């Protein structure tokens, strides 16, 4: 009965066997590709365009992107407030911010704002059309410009986003545990299916 029975391996088992074969026979090729990809990306990310692509991608990530943006807004407002209270001109402040913000995509927005200010615009107006600046930031800076109290508005923005970052980091740390558990369960469940489904099929054939 067993000699003539044709057993169709379940999909998880086929995938597990295929993975084993590739890792066993082509591990050096896989390792070489990984090393080449990592080295290539590192070299690319050292270029201006590479930094722009990388930082823009980080800001678009589903969970981490908003966290990076809030941290950048807090840093922007804090540094800008310090520079303004020290009497540094706005144009020079934007240049300093562009070099110290730590994100090439947002730094490009500072360059855009600086170019618009050179054309005679205020700070808030070009921020409305710049990327990555939430409406709340733009509105508070506009209020600060109109009232002549932009330093205080910048400090309020910094404080707000400091609280937002703290809350987001806490939420992220609370979510990491369940995410890891679910991920581990998926991996263990996959290999459990790959091992036990053929045994279950053999049992059904034996009973038949």
Image (spheres, rainbow, N blue to C red):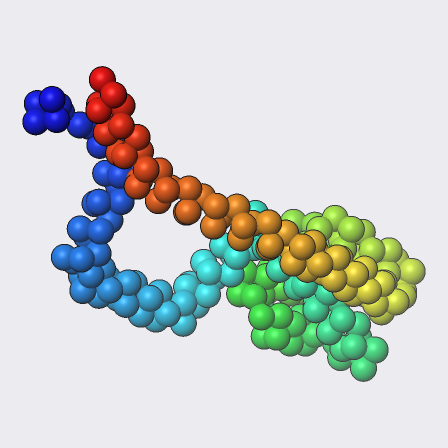
Q: Is residue 70 visible?
A: no
Percent coordinates x, y for residue 59 in the rendering: 56, 55
Residue sticking out furthest to the top? 208
Query: Residue 29 versus residue 63: which sits nearer the camera?
Result: 29
Figure label count: 0
Which image quadrant for residue 200?
top left
Residue at image coords 17%, 27%: 7
Q: x%, y% of residue 85?
A: 83, 78
Q: Nearer the viewer, residue 99 or 148?
A: 99
List x then y, in percent, for residue 82: 78, 77
Q: Residue at x 62, y 70 (%)?
A: 101
Q: Quadrant of residue 196?
A: top left
Q: Residue furthest bottom?
A: 86
User: In the picture, residue 94 is in which quadrant?
Assistant: bottom right
Q: Is residue 173 visible to the viewer in this orientation of the structure?
A: yes
Placement of 199 over or under 42, stated as above or below: above
* Residue 122 horizontal/vertical position (percent): 75, 59
On-image quarter of the C terminus: top left
Which residue is at the far left? Answer: 3
Direction from residue 208 to residue 107 in the image, left or right? right
**Residue at the image position 22 percent from the left and 65 percent from the top:** 32
Which residue, as the protein is rendered here, is positioned at the far front?
Answer: 207
Classify the position of the N terminus by image quarter. top left
Please tell me which residue is depicted at 31% across the width and 33% down the height of the picture.
197
Judge left or right: residue 195 versus residue 185. left
């Amino acid at each position: 009965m067993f000699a003539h029975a044709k057993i169709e391996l379940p999909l998880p088992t086929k995938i597990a066997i295929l993975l084993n074969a590739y890792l066993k026979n082509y591990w050096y090729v896989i390792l070489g590709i990984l090393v080449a990809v990592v080295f290539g990306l590192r070299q690319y990310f050292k270029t201006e365009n590479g930094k722009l692509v990388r930082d823009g991608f980080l800001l678009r990530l589903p969970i981490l992107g908003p966290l990076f943006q809030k941290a950048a807004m807090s840093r922007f407002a804090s540094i800008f407030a310090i520079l303004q209270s020290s009497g540094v001109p706005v144009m020079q402040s934007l240049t300093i911010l562009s070099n110290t913000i730590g994100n090439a995509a947002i730094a490009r927005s500072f360059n855009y704002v600086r170019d618009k200010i050179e054309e005679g615009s205020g700070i808030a107006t070009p921020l409305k059309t710049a990327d990555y600046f939430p409406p709340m930031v733009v509105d508070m800076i506009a209020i600060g410009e109109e009232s002549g109290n932009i330093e205080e508005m910048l400090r309020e923005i910094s404080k707000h986003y400091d609280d937002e970052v703290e809350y987001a980091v806490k939420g992220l740390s609370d979510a990491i545990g369940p995410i890891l558990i679910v991920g581990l369960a998926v991996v263990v469940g996959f290999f459990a299916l790959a091992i036990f489904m053929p045994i279950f099929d053999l049992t059904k054939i034996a009973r038949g």
